[in-house]
Amino acid sequence: MIEIKNLNKSFATPRGKITVFKDFNLTVKKGTFLGVSGKSGAGKSTLLSLIAGLQKADSGEILIEGRNILSLNDKDLSAFRNKNIGFISQEQSFLENLTVLDNVRLPFYLGGRKEALKSESAVSTAASVPDTGSDPSVRALSILESLGIAGLAESFPRQLSGGENHRLLIARALMNDPQIILADEPTESVDAERTEQIVKIFRGLADSGKTVILISHDKEALKDCDSILEIA
C-alpha cells in the first residue's frame, strides 16, 4: 500500500517558486490499478518521481508498506526502489550500448538478486510468464515475448521504433517482479491495438495483487483503471 501524507513540493524557477503539491494526501491500496490524468505541467510525472524516490519532497511522508521512503539514505533508497518499484518513465532511459535483452536483465544484476523470481504474477494471464526460477535470461525473454518484441532481443535500442522502445522500458520495469509499477505515459507512440495489450497487462498485474499507477492523456488507456485521480 502507498500512503502519501501532507506532501509538499515546490520548484524554484526564474519566474519564482512554483508549488506543485501543497498538503497533498493519497492512499493507494495494494492491488489497485489507479489512473492519473490532468493537464500538462500539473504535476503528474512529479508525483510518480516522488513515489519512486527519484525526487525529494520538501516535507511530508511517502509510506510504502508502512516504510517512509523519505527517511532512507540514497543507497538504501536505490536498493529499495530496485527491489520493490518498477518505474516506466517518459524518457527512454535505457543503455544504448546494451542489447534489448541486456537492458531488460539489468535490474536483476544491479540488485544482486540470487533468490528465485516469482514470475507467475509478473504479467497478466493474457500474456503470462512461466515460472523460470532464478534464470534472468529466460524470464527476460518471456516478458519480451508477452510484449511482442522477443524477436528484437539481440537488437540495440537505436534500432527500435519509439513504440518498441516504450515496450522495452515496460519489460525492464517488470524484470524484478516489483510490487509497485509506476507508468508515465507508457502507451505514447503506440497504436490502439498495442495500447490495449499493454493496458491488459497492467490490469492483470493489479488483479494479481500488484499496485499499478498509470499516467496517460489517453482516456482509452485509463478505462480499465479502478479509479482515476485528476490532478488540476
Image (tube, rainbow, N blue to C red):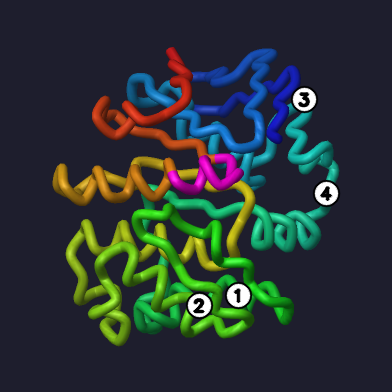
Q: CA distance from mark 1 to mark 2?
A: 6 Å
Q: Which residues are magenta?
A: 204-211
Of labels 1 and 4, earlier in sequence is: 4
Badge 2 element: helix
- Residue type at mark 1: give it: Phe
Q: What x and y, as percent, mark residue 146?
A: 34, 65
Secondary structure of the residue carrying numbered label 1 = helix
Q: Is residue 180 left or right of residue 88?
A: right
Q: Which amino acid, by three-letter code, is at mark 2?
A: Arg
Of callouts 4 and 3, which one flags the residue occurring earlier in the amino acid sequence?
3
Look at the picture and state if 32 lies above or below 196. above
Identity of the residue drawn at 44% across and 82% down = 102
Q: Give the residue pinned by disc 3.
A: 60
**Distance between the alpha carbons at the discs numbered 3 and 2:** 34 Å
Residue where numbered disc 4 is placed:
72
> Can you give x and y, in whole percent of width and height, for residue 71 in the image?
85, 42
Q: Earlier in the sequence, mark 1 or mark 3?
A: 3
The residue that label 1 is drawn on is 108
Which picture quadrant has residue 164? bottom left
Which residue is depicted at the point 44% across and 20% down?
228
Closer to the eye: label 3 or 2: 2
User: Going 29% across and 34% down the picture, which residue do you hit?
Assistant: 221
Q: Which residue is mark 2?
A: 105
Q: Position of residue 115 (x, y in %)?
A: 73, 77
Q: Residues within 10 Å of mark 3 (few under 14, many from 20)?
A: some
